[in-house]
């Protein structure tokens, strides 16, 4: 469990939820160019696989309760579109529980194969894109 002082203003039926927010900018080939916001996070690392990132947390948690993310282009506009190729999706490996308990979370970015085929395929976002992630974690086993 994380042993630090957290702001205690969130209302929740879960005991001791912790929200962490991460914001990082991408460089060439999806590399992490800079981390702009990452309280509670030690590092964000681009793995060798396309679109795969490892977020190393400063603390260990019991469970991942929730996750969301958006990607913005360099102008700050969320990436979406009417075509399949304009959308980026987020996913997580099946080992997420053991990873969180060890202090890491992996996030996989993917995009549809083409306009005609919505099957997701692992992909890097464009250079200059900004990734914003929110994790809600359980700080208690109860």
Image (cartoon, rainbow, N blue to C red):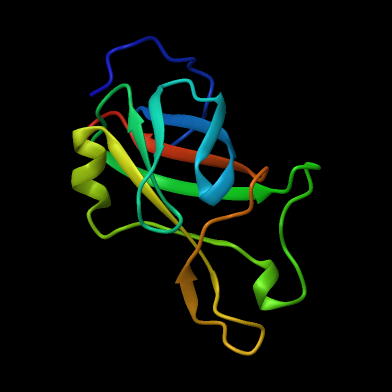
66 displayed left or right of 88? left
Q: Nearer the viewer, residue 68 or 35?
A: 35
* Quadrant of the rendered image containing residue 100: top left
Identify the image quadrant of the N terminus.
top left
Identify the image quadrant of the C terminus.
top left
The answer to whether residue 59 is seen in the rendering is yes
| Residue at the extreme top of the image, as rendered | 5
Q: Is residue 94 above or below residue 130?
A: below
* Quadrant of the rendered image containing residue 16: top left
The answer to whether residue 15 is seen in the rendering is no
Q: Is residue 82 above or below residue 30?
A: below
Report the number of discs. 0
| Residue at the extreme front of the image, as rendered | 28
71 displayed left or right of 21? right
In the rendered image, residue 4, in percent from the top left (x then y), is placed at 33, 11
In the rendered image, residue 8, in percent from the top left (x then y), is placed at 48, 17
Identify the residue at horizontal 27%, vertical 50% (top origin). Answer: 96
53 displayed left or right of 138? right
Identify the residue at horizontal 56%, vertical 29% (top origin). Answer: 34
In the rendered image, residue 23, in percent from the top left (x then y), is placed at 57, 33
In the rendered image, residue 13, in percent from the top left (x then y), is placed at 41, 38
Q: Nearer the viewer, residue 132 or 4?
A: 132
| Residue at the extreme bottom of the image, as rendered | 116
Identify the residue at horizontal 46%, vertical 72% (top origin). Answer: 121
């Amino acid at each position: 469990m994380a042993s630090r002082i957290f702001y205690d203003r969130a209302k929740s039926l879960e005991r001791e939820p912790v929200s962490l927010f991460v914001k990082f900018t991408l460089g060439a080939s999806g590399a992490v160019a800079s981390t702009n916001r990452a309280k509670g996070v030690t590092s964000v690392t681009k793995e060798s696989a396309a679109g795969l990132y490892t977020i190393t947390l400063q603390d260990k948690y019991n469970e991942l309760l929730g996750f969301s993310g958006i990607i913005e282009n360099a102008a700050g506009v969320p990436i979406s579109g009417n075509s399949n190729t304009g959308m980026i999706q987020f996913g997580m490996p099946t080992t997420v529980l053991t990873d969180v308990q060890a202090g890491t979370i992996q996030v996989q970015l993917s995009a549809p194969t083409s306009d005609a085929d919505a099957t997701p395929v692992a992909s890097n976002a464009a250079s200059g894109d900004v990734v914003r992630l929110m994790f809600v974690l359980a700080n208690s086993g109860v």
